[in-house]
Amino acid sequence: MKHNFGAGPGILPHEVLKQAAEAVVDFNGIGLSILEISHRSAEFEAVLDEAVRLVKELLGVPEGYSVLFLQGGASTQFAMVPYNLLPETGKAAYLESGVWANKALKEAKYFGNVEVVATSKESNFTYIPKDFTIPADASYFHITSNNTIYGTQLKQFFPSPVPVVCDMSSDIFSRKINVADFGLIYAGAQKNMGPAGTTLVVIKDEILGKADRKIPAMFNYQTQIEGGSMYNTPPVYPIYVSMLTLRWLKAKGGVEAIEKENRAKADALYTEIDRNPLFKGVCAKEDRSDMNVCFVAENPEHEKPFLKLCDEKGIVGVKGHRSVGGFRASIYNALPITSVHVLIDAMQEFAEKNK
Ligand code: PMP
């Protein structure tokens, strides 16, 4: 087995993959594949119901919120959010903490006015801006809880006079959050929840219906809520595998238990980065992500040979994003701490060889 540090689609629990593989051939012993049954069948309705129930339970979703499984990735939410929440003459506030935040705010500009309350672009997003005011007349305030490319993560959420919309694509289900602090949460499944192909949306019902705009059915949260994520044929298989992954998470003790494991994995890796003379971290220490650990070699000539050593040890997916360079170890929920120790050992072996 490889040690999969890929940034996404990311590692899934091995037992989930096995169950998912079996269901492709024969789903729950019904003599049909999960891929060939109707989304309106009792079997699939039970899957979707359980997936929604698990999301509510694991995240502690309060009354008054709807849970949706949509398509089009988090990138579709970049547009769907302003389409539904931002009136043409209104304004939305955005925190620009990375490229994904930037893409989100660019999409919002098609629908209304955008105020960027703060940005860390000038430093290639190595920190999360904290000193800003959220305008009270904005329709919503958009943030990215974890910046996948740069390895920064919001450790505390900002108190806001307006509904907070949060892109949690790369840290959903990795730590405890208070859903009541948010008007809308969205996340592509393919890091901590399941395979690519579905996007989780958790939305406070009362924030809808204020944009005063005609919205085509597929892009309208209200239609999707009324259809129970089945206005059209939903992504049956990604929802099924997500449900299995959420079952796995529940059996592990839920978000609270995984948060502890994630913290231990991140602590071990950052400790090695700070200790090892050949490597250094790239972002502000207080903003370091527990999901995507970005670091570089002190000597750029060490980059290639270190990646080669990783490859020899079955460590995959650690090459940094092209806009940051160096290395990025994504340590999502399903990555065991033993894999983190294999990476740490490789770093130590590399330092020993290159003294
Ligand atoms: N937001 C964040 C934080 C991401 O990491 C990503 C993808 N890696 C996206 C949005 C885009 O997601 P998708 O490819 O599902 O559209």
Image: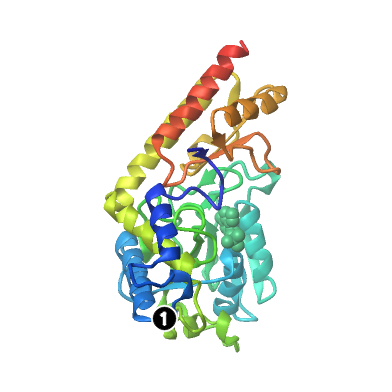
Give the side of residue 66 with respect to residue 143, left or right.
left
Relative to residue 150, is residue 207 depicted above or below? below
Please provide percent x and percent y for residue 121: 68, 48
Identity, as a three-letter code, of the amino acid under mark 1: Gly
Residue at left offset 30%, top offset 74%: 63
Q: How is the image coloured?
A: rainbow
Relative to residue 4, is residue 201 depicted above or below? below
Relative to residue 122, is residue 76 depicted above or below? below
The C terminus appears in which quarter of the rendering? top right
Please provide percent x and percent y for residue 327: 61, 35
Residue with the most extreme top position: 355
Residue at left offset 52%, top offset 57%: 190
Q: How many labels does the image show?
A: 1
Please provide percent x and percent y for residue 353: 60, 13
Q: Nearer the viewer, residue 96 or 225?
A: 225
As helix, strand or loop, the secondary structure at mark 1 comes to loop
The quarter of the rendering in which ligand 1 is drawn is bottom right
Give the side of residue 284 with respect to residue 114, left or right.
left
Residue 246 in sight here: yes
Relative to residue 282, is residue 90 depicted above or below? below
Residue 162 in sight here: no
Q: Which of 176 and 174 is in front in this view?
A: 174
Give the side of residue 346 with respect to residue 240, left or right.
right
Q: Which of 23 and 112 is in front in this view?
A: 23
Q: Which of 338 and 141 is in front in this view?
A: 338
Residue with the most extreme right position: 301
Q: Mark 1 points at which residue?
A: 228
Neighbour tally class for label 1: few under 14, some 14-19, many 20 plus, Cα within 10 Å:
some
Q: Does the residue labelled 1 lie within 8 Å of ligand 1?
A: no
Residue at left offset 51%, top offset 66%: 199
Please provide percent x and percent y for residue 258: 34, 46
